[in-house]
Image (cartoon, rainbow, N blue to C red):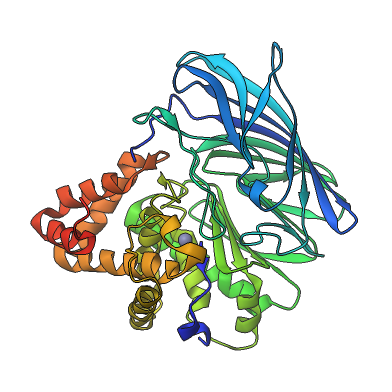
Amino acid sequence: MLPVLLGVLLSLAVSVLSLGSPSYRLELDLHPADALWKLEGKAIIAGHAPADLGALVFRFYQGYNAPFTVISARDAEGALPIYPVDAATFGVSLPLSRGQTFSVTLEYAAEIPPFPGGGYGTLSATEDVILVAQGYPFLLPWDEERGSWILEPVLSWGDQVVAEAADYSVTIRHPDGWEVVATGEERARGSGATEVRGQNLREFAFVLIKNYTPASRKENDVEIRSWYPRGLPRAGGEALELCVEALSLYEKLFGEYPFPELDAVAVPLNRAAGVEFPGLILAGIEYYRRYEAGRRELIFPMIFAHEVAHQWWYAQVGNDQVREPWVDEALATYTSGLAMAEWGLYGELRAHWERTYELGRSRNPDATPFDPLWRFPEGEGYGGIVYSGGALFFLELEEAMGKERLLSALRRYLKDYRWKLATGDDLLSILREEGGEAAEGVIRDWRGAVP
Ligand SMILES: [Zn+2]
């Protein structure tokens, strides 16, 4: 996610080893009902038990923003008991031994509220856009070392999803006249139904859009599309250019973009300038409007530089975004600086990072860039400290160990943790090993007494 810029610039655990990743077969039926949209869903979730278990635990990440109801759970042998864990988390009783395969079918229903709903507005409906992020139950990841499910508190700021990469096969049924843009590859199956498939997706999300136009380009076998509504052709075209350029730069620096497509869609968002999903970027439509009106603000290229960077840091290397949001956010922000530098915006960006870091620290003086999300109540100081401060930490590492060594350490981090969940310690260990004493000094300075 990229937070809305702070006032100053507005004018301008342990790696989770899995026994094979889970797979999701989703059938989602969407239809308008009065002011709301209704979602009726069936999720068939299959995988291997990560330990000897009495139950599987699932979470509706948007269940804190909108009502989700589980109607039934069953496997091949019949109905399974469901029990609540918290407001949006539930267990399905099913005794399994470690490594045993399972396939559980969950039927559920949800209401999609009018925009903004809760959070960033990523489960909400407007006249021309229905956003459906996390519109299904996620199997929680298993923490091998602690011997428990990873169940973090759900907060009203920051990104919440902690998930293993998985294969998805999805059928979305929707009224005629709407188009689906999703993580994965979309195939219209006649009017009113769209099939989507994706491999190694950290999560599945889509938008239904009406009266949008795509601008697209094929680059190194990746289909890159920018979707925008009428009246925003210059901003929509610029969004495409920025995505193409950021994607090819990051491919050169870190390695191949792993999906066949990248879609960027202009949508209404609440309290976020952009939000990342695997192969899908949702970008705040108000920034397109301001660009179209001739305003040239730092934030517009920042959105795409940042969210494309998440295709490496989040989509490929996952992390616990609640406990250690810096692991992907600081890295995505630092990486975005490499693209911004290519566009001649490095000086302005660095000044922005310094200013917003100071501002964040003045608002939340006890927090550090390495803190969990819950140390930033209501998001106070979060963007300034974790994103800008975190990026300055990586810049100092770059100065201390040399850019080439830092980039090579990041390539190793990608290779070692691709499609897994990495921890801050995993990342710091590689930085220490590759950067030696120079890196160690910077880490010690920034982390203070933290071991
Ligand atoms: Zn982000």
Residue 82, above or below 387: above
Q: Quadrant of residue 86?
A: top right
One can see residue 336 in this view: no
Q: Position of residue 49 (x, y in %)?
A: 49, 20
Q: 267 or 407: which is nearer to us? A: 267
One can see residue 172 in this view: yes
Query: Which residue is outermost to the top?
Result: 77
Residue at (72% x, 42% y) in the render: 68
Residue 260, above or below 297: above
Quick check: 367 left or right of 237? Answer: left
Q: 448 or 36: which is nearer to us? A: 448
Residue at (37% x, 68% y) in the render: 385
Q: Position of residue 346 (x, y in %)?
A: 35, 78
Q: Position of residue 255 (x, y in %)?
A: 36, 50
Quick check: 204 left or right of 382? Answer: right
Q: Quadrant of residue 310?
A: bottom left
Query: Which residue is outermost to the left?
Result: 437
Q: Quadrant of residue 286?
A: bottom right
Residue at (41% x, 49% y) in the render: 323
Q: What count of labels does the image hold?
A: 0
Query: Which residue is outermost to the right?
Result: 34
Residue at (32% x, 63% y) in the render: 368
Residue 198, above or below 180: above
Q: Position of residue 211 (x, y in %)?
A: 80, 65
Quick check: 222 left or right of 341? Answer: right
Residue 102, above or below 194: above
